[in-house]
Image (cartoon, rainbow, N blue to C red):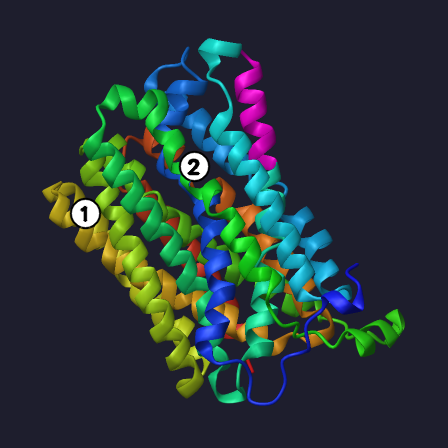
């Protein structure tokens, strides 16, 4: 636990100006960039670390390794998230960011299967587990910080920075991937080009640590430590179940949208640089729509925001994939990606704002961390693997749309039942 002298004064009064709250988002963006870049280079990583398999089989192993990173997210949420409730949001965010930096550097420098044999995929797996642990502990403290730093009438907008900066991370990953795929030959991209994307993420870790070190603390540490465990607010089991279903639906949709890059290369047979254009579109939509949805939630309520986004996506999911597979052009890919990304981001912002407003401050960091990480581990981590597997088994390019629709229906039922503040 940090000493009293190392903790800045709590945020009070009207809250931090949003330009200062953005520093939380910058660190969040760097952490999500490091975690998500793996999925965008899944094909290249599969060839490097699982070369004995056929391309499709190697991709499945690569996506499975991506999914493994979600297994430790609940553990990270439990340990780092609850640490954020005890020691403060700031030290918890510093810890998660440091772990992510170490893991991304290790992953970027792991030798290939051809160089060290089975040790290569084992190291790859270990670093993904550390990444998952770190990211699992990131969302709770950072979301708690944002809502506690916000003025009362702008809490939705501030919390939306959590999702908006995830969009920035996706945008940066897409731009890096697009640039590398344009500048390098397919052979160079596969052998070493993808490592550059990871090293770029590792290079900015010191910047993120510096930013977070200079933050003010939002948790009232003295009163929090004085509170007896027996009087700490309890969260209703019904709220926990509904939150897991809502977040599970959202994270499934999010990772299916993020899969568009791989889907474009593997199913639509588009070139890598064209496929990375979908990632850029996703990042742009995620960033802009998140801020709009957060602003809107302050005016009409978070529940209406998430239900509006979900209904629109449920109606458009299957038609979008039908159009995409009928036309199979970059323009169609980008249009479909923009529609689906905008819808799922609206849903996600509505959910996280509703949860942040509903959960008590004393347990907010740990509760959000564990609920978010648990939902992502149960549903998000397997989404891309299952979509690829279902596509192979059924032979239908519409498998992602059906899987997405099922998740949205379940999530919609939970959203209708949730009493948002």
Q: Which residue shows up at 24% across the image and 33% down it?
A: 181
Tell me where residue 51 appears, x and y as whole percent: 40, 14
Q: Which residues are magenta?
A: 117-129
Q: Earlier in the sequence, mark 2 or mark 1?
A: 2
Q: Which residue is mark 2?
A: 198
Viewer-nearest residue: 290 or 92: 92
Is 190 situated above or below 22?
above
Q: Which residue is mark 1?
A: 333
Q: Circle 1 sits in a helix, a strand or a loop, which is it?
A: helix
Is 49 situated above or below 31?
above
Q: Quadrant of residue 420?
A: bottom right
Is 244 situated above or below 193?
below
Circles 2 and 1: CB atoms closer than 8 Å: no
Using the rendered image of the protein, determine whether residue 135 is visible from the camera's viewpoint.
yes
Using the rendered image of the protein, determine whether residue 314 is visible from the camera's viewpoint.
no
Tell me the quarter of the image containing the N terminus: bottom right
């Amino acid at each position: 636990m940090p000493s009293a002298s190392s903790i800045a004064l709590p945020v009070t009064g009207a809250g931090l100006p949003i330009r200062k709250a953005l520093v939380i988002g910058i660190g969040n963006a760097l952490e999500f960039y490091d975690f998500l870049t793996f999925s965008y280079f899944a094909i290249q990583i599969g060839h490097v670390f699982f070369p004995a398999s056929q391309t499709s089989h190697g991709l499945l192993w690569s996506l499975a390794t991506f999914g493994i990173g979600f297994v430790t997210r609940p553990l990270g949420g439990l340990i780092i998230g609850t640490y954020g409730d005890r020691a403060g949001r700031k030290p918890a965010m510093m810890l998660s960011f440091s772990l992510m930096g170490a893991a991304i550097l290790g992953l970027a420098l792991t030798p290939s299967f051809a160089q060290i044999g089975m040790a290569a995929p084992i190291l790859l797996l270990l670093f993904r587990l550390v990444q998952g642990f770190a990211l699992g502990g990131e969302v709770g403290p950072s979301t708690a910080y944002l809502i506690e730093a916000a003025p009362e009438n702008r809490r939705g907008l501030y919390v939306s920075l959590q999702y908006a900066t995830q969009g920035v991370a996706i945008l940066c990953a897409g731009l890096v991937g697009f640039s590398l795929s344009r500048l390098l030959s397919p052979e160079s991209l596969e052998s070493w080009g993808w490592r550059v994307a990871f090293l770029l993420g590792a290079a900015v870790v010191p910047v993120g640590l510096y930013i977070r070190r200079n933050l003010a603390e939002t948790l009232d540490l003295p009163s929090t430590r004085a509170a007896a465990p027996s009087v700490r607010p309890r969260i209703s089991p019904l709220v926990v179940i509904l939150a897991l279903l809502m977040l599970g639906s959202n994270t499934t949709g999010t990772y299916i949208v993020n899969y568009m890059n791989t889907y474009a290369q593997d199913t639509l047979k588009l070139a890598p640089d064209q496929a990375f254009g979908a990632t850029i579109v996703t990042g742009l939509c995620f960033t802009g729509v998140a801020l709009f949805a957060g602003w809107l939630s302050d005016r009409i309520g978070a529940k209406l925001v998430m239900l509006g986004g979900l209904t629109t996506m449920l109606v458009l999911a299957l038609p979008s994939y039908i159009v995409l597979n009928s036309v199979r052009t970059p323009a169609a890919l980008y249009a479909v990606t923009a529609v689906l990304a905008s819808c799922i981001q609206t849903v996600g912002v509505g959910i996280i704002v509703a949860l942040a407003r509903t959960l008590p401050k004393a347990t907010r960091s740990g509760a959000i961390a564990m609920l978010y990480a648990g939902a992502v581990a149960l549903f998000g981590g397997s989404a891309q693997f299952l979509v690829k597997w279902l596509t192979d088994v059924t032979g239908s390019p519409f498998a992602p749309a059906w899987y997405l629709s099922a998740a949205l229906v379940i999530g919609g039922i939970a959203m209708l039942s949730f009493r948002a503040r």
